Amino acid sequence: MRELDDAALWGWDPTPGIVSVWAEPDGKAHVWRRIGGDLVREDVWFRPWVVLARGDGVEGPRVTLLEADTDGVYFSVPATWSVEDERRVVDEVAALLPPLVQLELEGRYAAMLSHEPKNYALLSYEGALTLRGVAFRSSRAEPFGEAFLRRAIERLLVGDVVGVRDAYLATIGALRRRELRTFDVSSRVRLTKTLAEYLAIRGARRELSYEAMFASGRDTWTVGERVHIYRTRNGRGGVANADATADEDSRDYDVEHYVRNLRETFAVRLARAFAPDDFAAVFADPDQLSLFSPSLTTVRTVLL
């Protein structure tokens, strides 16, 4: 029964060649295995499980799992718990783990938003915001979008839904008034084709990055070179300069393209914090408000 116990309790599996496992909350898991030199992906299902060291004296749920991976576990606890209560639960779970697996309490946070595995936001009890993962911090993301996310998440994690809406409207307003620099809407990209390689496919498919280089007067570049690209008001590409002065900055970016980008690329990363109808109300187009939208003062966040 030892093998069965291990499989049920620790998730141990004798399947050979496992390289990586990605598990979803609904019980689906993607398993990558090395078979005969080939990397193969298999989709399987597992049964979710919960382990408690003991059940005496427990009334209702003790902890709620928010995120778990190979680096750590994040969970929420009842509001009435003290740090001693939290340490006790960590010690209880640690006592169940194999000898070489260690678990300890590393930190405490007032609130958390889990967007997807390894992509989350944490608010400390002192008010410091920590963002983890490429969903919130990426060298390729447009600076205006990341700035919006930081402002919105700061308000979100203290329960200020009106403040989230205000951050959204302020960003739209700054875009439509062209108050943002061109560099703020640009995306950092890596050029992977030579001029000859791009010209060979240009007739069938044009790519914004290389068209932006041509539009800026450049017809030579180095493979691997990184540049900041943006979409102009005529739908073409341009190259942004972080050091451009106010007189040099044309700010000829496609405003409505970036307004859509704000909602569809950045605001959507906050979707798990709201019920669907509430998310639609918080991030509604200011020019197309519904008469039946709920009052934002009644909206409550979830999954925090």
Image (cartoon, rainbow, N blue to C red):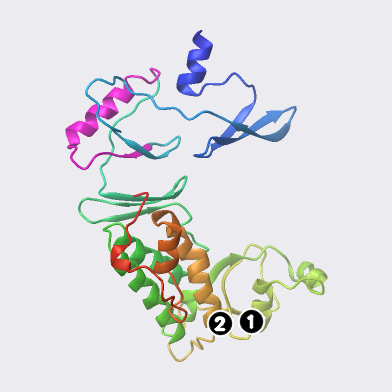
Q: Looking at numbered disc 2 in the image, what kind of residue is underneath it?
A: Asp
The answer to if 196 sits in the magenta stretch is no
Residue 103: image quadrant is top left
Q: Nearer the viewer, residue 264 or 292?
A: 292
Label 2, on which residue?
Answer: 254
Give the percent coordinates (x, y) of residue 23: 53, 37
Q: Eyeballing the image, is 135 above or below 10?
A: below
Q: Earlier in the sequence, mark 1 or mark 2?
A: 1
**Residue at x 24% of width, y 39% of height:** 78
Give the percent coordinates (x, y) of residue 271: 44, 58
Q: Nearer the viewer, residue 244 or 262?
A: 262
Label 1, on which residue?
Answer: 235
Q: Are marks 1 and 2 in contact (CB under 8 Å)?
A: yes
Spot the residue most to the bottom.
247
Q: Is residue 12 left or right of residue 157?
A: right
**Residue at x 28% of width, y 66% of height:** 297
Give the percent coordinates (x, y) of residue 12: 52, 21
Name the disc covering residue 283, or none: none
Q: Is residue 176 left or right of residue 232?
A: left
Q: Is residue 43 left or right of residue 304?
A: right
Q: Eyeballing the image, is 151 above or below 254?
A: above
**Residue at x 68% of width, y 73% of height:** 210
Tag 1's secondary structure?
loop
Which residues, given as a range, are shown in magenta?
73-99
The answer to if 78 sits in the magenta stretch is yes
Give the percent coordinates (x, y) of residue 95: 32, 19
Q: Looking at numbered disc 1 in the image, what kind of residue is underneath it?
A: Gly
Q: Eyeballing the image, is 141 above or below 25?
A: below
In three-dimensional space, the C-alpha distance between marks 1 and 2, rounded to whole angstroms, equals 7 Å
Q: Is residue 263 left or right of residue 218?
A: left
